Image (spheres, helix red, strand yellow):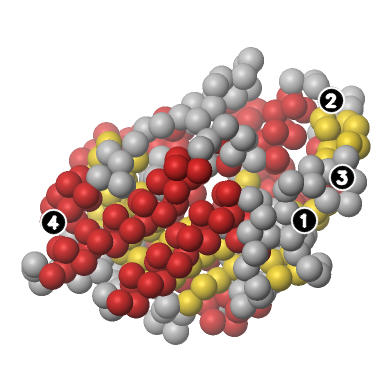
Amino acid sequence: MQNKTYLITGGLGLIGSNLAKKIYKKVKNSKIVILDNFTVYIDPLKQVYQDHRKDRFKKIINENEYRNSQSKRIFVERGNAQDPKIVIEMLQKYKPHMIFHTAAMPLARLKNATVKEFREGSVDTTSNLLECVKYVQDNSKYRLKRFLYISSSMVYGDFKKKYVVENDELRPKEIYGTMKLAGEIVTKGMCKENSIPYNIVRPSAVYGPTDMNLRVSQYFIEKAFLNEKISIHGKKESLDFTFIDDLVDGCWLAANSKKGENETFNITYGKARTLYDFVIILKKYFRGLKYQIVQRDKKRPKRGTLKNDKARKILGFKPKVGLEKGISLYLKHFKKQK
């Protein structure tokens, strides 16, 4: 595993930056290429919301390592994964043996993005990446060893039972899940047609330090710091909260597993908790925290546990961070920033 090159699209995002951090520490002499369009989808909110991109760089390597070796091992390219010229140039220049495709239209844009924007974020970027891989492979000796696509639990739509498994029916309820599913179909079809080994990863309710995607966990924690009342949309509403480190571990195991080649995995903690549970845990840290129970948004899919038995069996995946520990780690990061 020496002298390998890894391309991460959306590499300055929560998932991409943490993947870069893991690879940097785990694979000595590796090169990490980050392709990101540097788009920020949130506006700073009072003193709490922050642009965490600089902080994400610090998570990859410490300051001294950055000064001494960044130019040798970390390469940041500003550009859009939909642009074939940019992607082909990068493939020819760096010849990555793995691509982690984490770039997508984030949930922060769910309410005001157009269908076209969501299609571009999930489908067009995926098809362009794979078309460019095919072009370079057809015209050189280059061969991609693995393409990993980050999908979403939203592809399942409303859970018909308390849990779902990978081969359950996929019936997304809204545009985000629909386009993520379309990205899965593109990945499977193009990779099979062009003999590109692939993985599809379905995470759920990802959370952790430097999140700036307006996920519910970020919303709850930042409301707590602002001493503002939290609205819980349904007391029994539950999500399979997955700490970022566990997700990254699962992605790494999938991408490096021969047995797991061309497979789809739920990479989650594997046990749903209610939104109410999340807030009650927060109350241990914010004694004056106020909350109210409001009616759940029926437009959003009703979710629960994404069973991860397949990933455990094939990959040896073992999530380590439960909700109580994950919230504690998240809060420690915020306290350092204040």
Left or right of residue 237: residue 331 = left
- N-term mark: 3 or 1: 3
What is the total number of numbered labels drawn onto the structure image? 4
Instruction: Identify the residue position indicated by label 3 in the image.
Output: 234
Q: Position of residue 51 (x, y in %)?
A: 49, 26
Q: Quadrant of residue 234?
A: top right
Q: Position of residue 218 (x, y in %)?
A: 66, 36
Give how far apart the Cα atoms at labels 2 and 3 are: 15 Å
Give how far apart the Cα atoms at labels 1 and 4 are: 44 Å
Q: Where the N terminus falls, by quadrant?
A: bottom left
Give how far apart the Cα atoms at labels 3 and 1 are: 11 Å
| Residue 92 numbered tag | 4
Instruction: Identify the residue position indicated by label 1 in the image.
Output: 302
Question: Which type of secondary structure does the marked residue at label 3 adopt?
Answer: loop
Tell me which amino acid carries mark 4: Gln
Give how far apart the Cα atoms at labels 4 and 2 are: 52 Å
Q: Are marks 2 and 3 in contact (CB under 8 Å)?
A: no
Give how far apart the Cα atoms at labels 3 and 4 are: 50 Å
Instruction: Identify the residue position indicated by label 2 in the image.
Output: 229
